[in-house]
Image (spheres, helix red, strand yellow):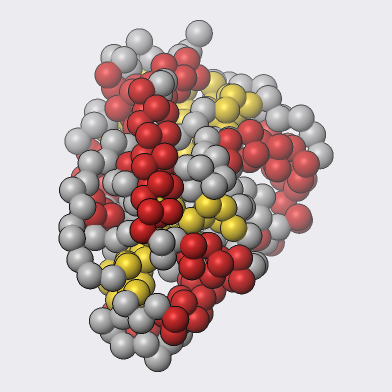
């Protein structure tokens, strides 16, 4: 069995970290020795305990992710030099066979693997979009990193792989492995009116303001509707989002992020993901399993798995008029139920054919 070192760029617990944990479990269950490296300069945002429950060893070093600009990334590489030196020493001393870097902005792993001439699995979750920290000035750097012969790049959709190939101007030898689908089962909670919900971060790329403004127009015609937004990181962020509208708190409900996503899904009728850019958003598949009608951005790879007007509805994030039209259609309970039922069946089918462990296991193998 191999010794596999996993590296992440944060200590938060979001979608890409959920995939990381699935990969950790897969490697551990296959009998590999599993170590995890996390950045020491940031505070724990929920990932540490989950990692410690699986890994044989957890390490901490001061390193930062790349991105945002060429100049910043150059400074990051200089800042990371101490951690890289320590990391290379660890790899050689402990006989690490494979380095696994989670997310494309985690670049210390490929540098360490290259220095030690070992396999580097690079699991990409982002798109080449400025809202993910991508800048065209980074093209040369990433082209050079991608060329390392020990790379085994994992993309999470064909859409994502094509986008990176176009931006970098080269063919990327990658394996497409769809994200593992976390099983979700929710008992619907009876309530009055129609509740529309969003679950996730309130970052700029999530396009929350457009959703709020669209809902205001809908609510003027359908006063029995509510909008629930869950995902704030602080009281200040809650107030910032509430300030986008004059609607009362019982109509526009804004709450902090929660681990109890099942409870959230069980209390809403429509889930909306209005993001300007997504790769393969796990929240969509979770909401569908909970028998929730889903409206989602066209700017993701989900069209590879789900069908428009059958399993869900897709809308351009720059077209609030289309979102509003779709929401008005979904005020009809029968139409909403039809979408929710088809969407739930579709995800259950995907779950039954899921082969994530087998796929990621073949990539992690040191053969």
Percent coordinates x, y for residue 185 in the rendering: 23, 41
Percent coordinates x, y for residue 278 in the rendering: 55, 52
Q: Is residue 252 above or below residue 200?
A: below
- The number of discs equals 0
- Nearer-the-camera pick, 293 or 184: 293
Percent coordinates x, y for residue 237 in the rendering: 37, 78
Q: In this view, does 255 lie above or below 103?
A: below
- Nearer-the-camera pick, 210 or 328: 328
Quadrant position of residue 154: top right
Residue 211 visible at all: yes
The structure residue drawn at horizontal position 76% and vertical position 45%, both measured from the top left corner, is: 167
Q: In this view, does 95 lie to the left or right of 55?
A: right
Q: In this view, does 314 lie to the left or right of 227?
A: right
- Nearer-the-camera pick, 336 or 46: 336
Residue 88 visible at all: no
Percent coordinates x, y for residue 182 in the rendering: 32, 37
Q: Is residue 43 above or below residue 287?
A: below
Q: Which residue lies furthest to the bottom in this view?
A: 246
Q: Residue furthest right?
A: 169
Quadrant position of residue 113: top right
The structure residue drawn at horizontal position 56% and vertical position 67%, both measured from the top left corner, is: 325
The structure residue drawn at horizontal position 46% and vertical position 19%, both measured from the top left corner, is: 359
- Nearer-the-camera pick, 25 or 248: 248
Q: In this view, does 86 lie to the left or right of 275?
A: left
Q: Classify the position of the N terminus by image quarter.
A: top left
The structure residue drawn at horizontal position 48% and vertical position 56%, both measured from the top left corner, is: 295
């Amino acid at each position: 069995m191999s010794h596999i070192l996993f590296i992440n760029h944060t200590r938060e617990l979001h979608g890409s970290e959920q995939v990381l944990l699935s990969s950790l479990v897969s490697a551990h269950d296959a009998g590999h020795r599993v170590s995890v490296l996390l950045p020491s300069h940031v505070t724990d945002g929920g990932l540490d305990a989950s990692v410690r429950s699986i890994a044989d060893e957890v390490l901490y070093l001061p390193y930062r992710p790349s991105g945002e600009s060429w100049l910043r990334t150059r400074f990051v590489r200089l800042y990371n030099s101490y951690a890289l030196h320590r990391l290379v020493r660890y790899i050689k001393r402990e006989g690490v066979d494979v380095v696994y870097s989670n997310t494309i902005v985690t670049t210390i792993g490929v540098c360490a693997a290259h220095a030690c001439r070992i396999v580097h699995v690079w699991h990409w979750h982002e798109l080449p979009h400025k809202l993910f920290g991508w800048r065209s000035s980074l093209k040369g750097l990433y082209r050079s990193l991608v060329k390392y012969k020990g790379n085994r790049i994992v993309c999470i959709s064909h859409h994502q792989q094509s986008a990176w190939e176009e931006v970098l101007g080269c063919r990327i030898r990658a394996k497409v492995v769809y994200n593992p689908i976390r099983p979700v089962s929710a008992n619907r909670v009876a309530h009055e009116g129609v509740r529309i919900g969003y679950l996730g971060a309130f970052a700029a790329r999530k396009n929350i303001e457009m959703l709020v403004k669209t809902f205001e127009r809908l609510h003027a015609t359908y006063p029995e509707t509510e909008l629930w937004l869950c995902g704030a990181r602080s009281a200040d962020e809650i107030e910032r989002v509430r300030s986008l509208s004059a609607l009362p708190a019982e109509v526009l409900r804004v709450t902090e992020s929660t681990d109890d996503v099942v409870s959230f899904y069980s209390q809403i009728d429509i889930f909306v993901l209005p993001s300007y850019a997504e790769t393969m958003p796990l929240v969509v598949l979770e909401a569908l399993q909970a028998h929730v009608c889903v409206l989602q951005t066209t700017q993701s790879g989900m069209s590879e798995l789900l069908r428009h007007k059958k399993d869900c509805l897709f809308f351009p994030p720059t077209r609030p008029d289309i979102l509003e039209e779709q929401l008005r259609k979904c005020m009809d309970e029968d139409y909403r139920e039809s979408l929710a039922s088809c969407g739930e069946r579709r995800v259950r089918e995907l779950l039954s054919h899921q082969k994530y462990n087998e796929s990621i296991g073949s990539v992690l193998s040191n053969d």
